[in-house]
Each structure stands twice: as C-alpha cells, then as structure tokens.
Amino acid sequence: MPSPPAFKPSVLCILSLKRNLTIFALLCALCTHAVAAAKPNVVIFLADDSGWGDYSFNGNTNLKTPNLDSLARSGVVLDRFYVCSVCAPTRAEFLTGRYHPRGGVRGVSTGLERLNTDERTIADAFKAAGYATGAFGKWHNGSQWPYHPNARGFDEYYGFTSGHWGEYFDPPLEHNGRPVRGQGFIADDLTTHAIEFMERHREQPFFCYIPFNTPHSPWAVPDKFWQRFKDKPIGLRASPGSREQLDQTRCALAMMENLDWNVGRVLQRLDELKLADNTVVVYFSDNGPNSWRWSGGMKGIKGSTDEGGVRSTFFLRWPAKIKPGTTVREIAGAIDLLPTLTALAGVPRVGNKPLDGRDLSPLLFGKTGEWPERMIFSHQNGNVSARSQQYRFDNRGALFDMIADPGQTRNIAKDQPDLAAKFAAAVTAWRADVLPGSKDDRPYPVGYAEFPRTPLPARDGLPHGGVKRSGGAPNCSYFVNWTSLDDRMTWDIAVNTSGDYDVEVLYTCPLADAGATIELEFNGRKLAGKVAPGWDPPLYTNQDTVPRPPGESQMKEFRSLNFGVMRLEKGRGLMTLRALDIPGRNVMDVRQVNLTLRGKRAAPSKSNEQL
C-alpha cells in the first residue's frame, strides 16, 4: 500500500500562520507595554509633631507601632531624613520641592503659613498626568481660594486648613469648601474618608495625601488607646534635665498608637483592593516632637533647628519595584519628595521654577554610585542650621560631628576652622539666596466664582481696643472681650469679584447680652445688624484626655448668625467689624466671618447649622 503523500503547506496556510503569529506577538507586546505603563498609585502619610523617637522601629520600648514597623521593613528607610522644625514649612517643601521661604511660607499662622499662588505643587503634577488627587487632613498652607487645597491640584479635600484644631471629637471640618461635621475621633474620620477616596478611584491611578493632625496637641485620644498608657511607667525618658511632663508623653504615645492603627487600616484596604503591589506608600513627619520625650538622645524638639527638631522618620514601600529591607544612609529631605515621586511614577513636573530637592530614586533602587555631597538647610524664625553627611553647623556657629557626637555636645569649630568657615559661607549664601528681603504684605483673597465661600477666621484678623484672642496661639482661636464701642476687629482683604455677598458670623453671646447692633464696613460700604438670638454654650469638657497647653483655646459650639447681604466692590482694603450699640456687658465672641459670593453658592452643607 503506498504511503500517504508528505504534507506540503500551501502558501495561503503559511501566510495565515505568519499573520496569526504576528498578531499574537503584537498582543503580547501590547500587554507587556500595558503592564509596564501602569502608573503606580501614591499614598502619602504625614504625621504632625511626631518625633524620630516615637516609633518602636526606632527603639522606643514605651509603645508599639506594628503597622509602621512593618511598613519600614517591607520597603526602604531613609535613615537621615530632614524636615523643617515646624509644620507649615515642611508641608510647603513637600508640595513644591523648594525651600519654604521661596514660596512665601514664613511661619505657621496669621497668614504667614500661605504658599504663594505662583508655586506649582506635586498634586498639580499628578493631576495633570491623569491621577485622581485627594487630600484628607490638616492642610496648613492657606485657607482661602486660591491658597486652598482644591486650588493647588487636589480634586477632593476633607479636613481643616488651619495649622491647629481645637476639637478632636466630632469636629467641625470642611469638604471641598463646605462645612461638615466629622464623625468620631478626627484621625479615624480622616482615614475613613481617605479609604473611601481610594475605593472610588480603584480603577484609575490616584494620589492620596493624608496629613494627620496627630500627635499635635490638644492632648486627646480615644479612651481605648489611652487606657494602655494611663498609668503606664515610662521607661525611656527625655534627656536628663529636660522638662518632660509624663502625662503629655503618655498621651502623645497613645496618639501614636492610634495613628499606627489608622495607617494599618489603609494598608489593609490596599491589600483587599489588590492595589498594594503597585502603590507607592510614603510615611514621614513634619518636625520633631512637640513635647520633651525620648528621641534617641538627639538635641532639640519642635521649633529647634538642631538635629532633634528636624530629623524625621521616613519609610517608603513599593512592592512591585523596591527591594524590602533597604536602608539609605545618605542625607535627604522633604525638598526631595517632589522630584523623587514624580520620577518614580513617570509623571512630568508642572512649572519651571528651579528645585532645591534631588531625585532620590537611584538611592531607592540601590544605585548609589557617585552620589554628590550636599548640604541641607533648616530655617526657623531667622535661625539657620546646615547639615552635611557628617556634620551639623548650628544657628550659633557651632560645628558638630554627627557621627562621633550625635547629641551635639562638643563644638569642634575651633578644632576645624576651615570646615567651620566653609559652613558659615554656605549659610550666608543660602540666606542671601532664599530668605525674603521684605515683609509679608499679602491680603486675604475674597470672591472667586469657582469657590464662592470665603472663610475669614479670627486667626487671620487683628483685634483692636480691648478685644483679645481666646488663646496665645492664633490658630483655632476666637475673638473675646468685645465690650466697648471703641473695640473692633479687622481683616486685610482683597475682593476679586464685585458683587453681592452673603455675610455670616460664627458667634456666641450670653443671652442677657443679646441685641447689640454691629456693623461690617469695607471701603465705604456698610452693613448693620443685630446680634440675636443669644447663644451661650459652655466650653467643651469632653475633648481633652490630659489638659491642653495653656496657649491653646478651649473651644465651644459656635452658631451661625446670618448677617445679611453686602455689596463689595473689587479692590483691597480693611474689612472692619465694630459695634454701634451695646445694651449688655458684651457684644459677642467671634470665631469666623464667612463671605459668600451670591449667585455662585456652593452646594449646601450636610452638617448641622451650629458650626
């Protein structure tokens, strides 16, 4: 029987096979490209007033921070990471990649915390690249549009814009400019909203910034966290001779364990959403500890430009790309985060102002090579210190070897005069280049169609006559002791849009004193009204776990007084609130004046009216 003929594929069959293979190869290439091109999500945790020593990862046996310890072990630790000595400047440096004075941030209150509107932020860059952007927490770089976070690249904002908040349980907050009432403990509430943001945007890349307001005082924490510390002996203590108050330490550590729990909530949800592998998670703090407590023997706390005031814990995790258990010894700082995170995500910068920070991604991937020597400068209230890889030159001209003497106990400037002179020259040059040469003269902007409601808190105004602030710290204060026709309060404002404005005052007033006639005046325009009805709630008694610092105001429930409609013309001037008639002993206490451009009203608030 003859064998079957050998198979001879036709030309058509060969062409078909080649075509199918080509299509298959293209599909594989497209799939590979899609995976490679998948943009990572970015989650930034920023603690408020947490020192380097407030973590069990760094050796503090007084507390347990298992979620943050795990975050550190599963990614990279920047061992020498530097921030500013107070809150708002660090936030500005993170947002811009530039030293904070360049962007107009000179302080933490009374308008000095505002980031100039010509600065472009890291959120601007990620938003332009197609990311959903959200911020949930303490902003502290300006309250009015266009300083507001919704004007700085964040699609969604939930939290408070001040540098300090006086209510930590069921607090008055805002959501995209609308007043809302928070639910429960503030850090828990902020975390819940951040998680909901990530859930809503799981199908697109997101940039989620969570600037907590803890362990910043007031000293308040949920009872289940406080009970672990209420009577706990504190083993590791601040340096001998310090002014450590143990109950403040206990509460700060309880707040840290709560913060750790909330970080764990976010990390767990990323796992559940199957997003963890391609999410860059960053954690750091904005300055040194806000009270005297253990900090590894470093000199200084919050407000100091010494090592303890400006060295922060820093963890970064990206499971898809970065090897766990990595430690970077080279010095780095908040100014490096914008260039680093945009580089990691492949996101172009927005804006063309020169950066002070560096892209750290080679260090994160272990490619140290020839890493250039650098100095990182710290500034607070005219004091400047400089840090190199080995030395710190402090604001008094003393030089310290930070490897041999991490506690800054021995000044070696006389032993190494050439090195001290090099640092002194660098500081002089930095001052000339970075520090502003004139005083801050920025008014508070009012009247933008895209953000019609403008808050003018007491923090941003000035008291005159017998009027005082309720506390020494202007943030989250209110005006009190308004008893005379000679008393007044003013706000330096610039109206952007001529129009009719609804005027609202957040006030309290003893019932017996109700009925005063008050007048609001701006550039010749006046609006008068009555303070009624009386509203005299007690100070809160359920907010503090241990007594708050004496400079911080005790808060109470303020009510909205709808004052009427006032015509404001475009221009700058002093807005003045005064009394025309005082039938009782006091006029009222004032927390805030709100001006809302008519015809452009924001969506109504879901909160109760007593904010």
Image (cartoon, helix red, strand yellow):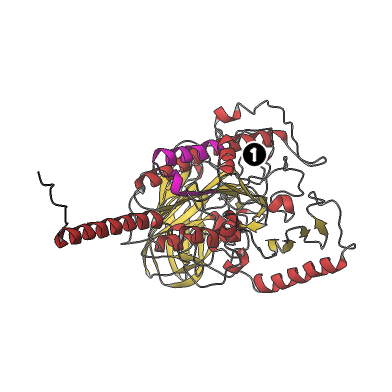
Residue lying at the far front in this picture: please name it: 1
Hey, which residue is sitting farthest left in the picture?
1
> As drawn, is 82 to the left or to the right of 501?
right
Magenta part of the protein: which range?
A: 260-282
Residue drawn at (56%, 29%) of the image? 223
Q: Which residue is mark 1?
A: 57
**Position of the C terminus by quadrant:** top left
- Is residue 271 rendered magenta in the image? yes
Q: Relative to residue 390, is residue 337 drawn left or right?
A: left
Q: Residue at x 43, y 57 (%)?
A: 154
Q: Secondary structure at mark 1?
A: helix
- Find residue 451 and report its horizontal and vertical position in percent: 39, 61
Q: Amino acid at mark 1?
A: Phe
Where residue 573 appears, x then y in whole percent? 50, 70
Residue 14 percent coordinates (x, y): 19, 59
Query: Is 6 inside the magenta-drawn segment?
Result: no
Q: Mark 1, residues whose alpha carbon is within 10 Å: few (<14), some, or many (≥20)?
A: many
Observer able to see residue 34: yes
Q: Is residue 588 visible?
A: no
Q: Magenta region's main secondary structure?
A: helix
Q: Position of residue 551 (x, y in %)?
A: 66, 46
Q: Residue at x 50, y 51 (%)?
A: 321
User: Extreme right residue here?
Assistant: 415
Q: Using residue 466 as the reference point, say whether residue 187 is left or right of it.
A: left
Depth check: give the residue in front, 321 or 255: 321
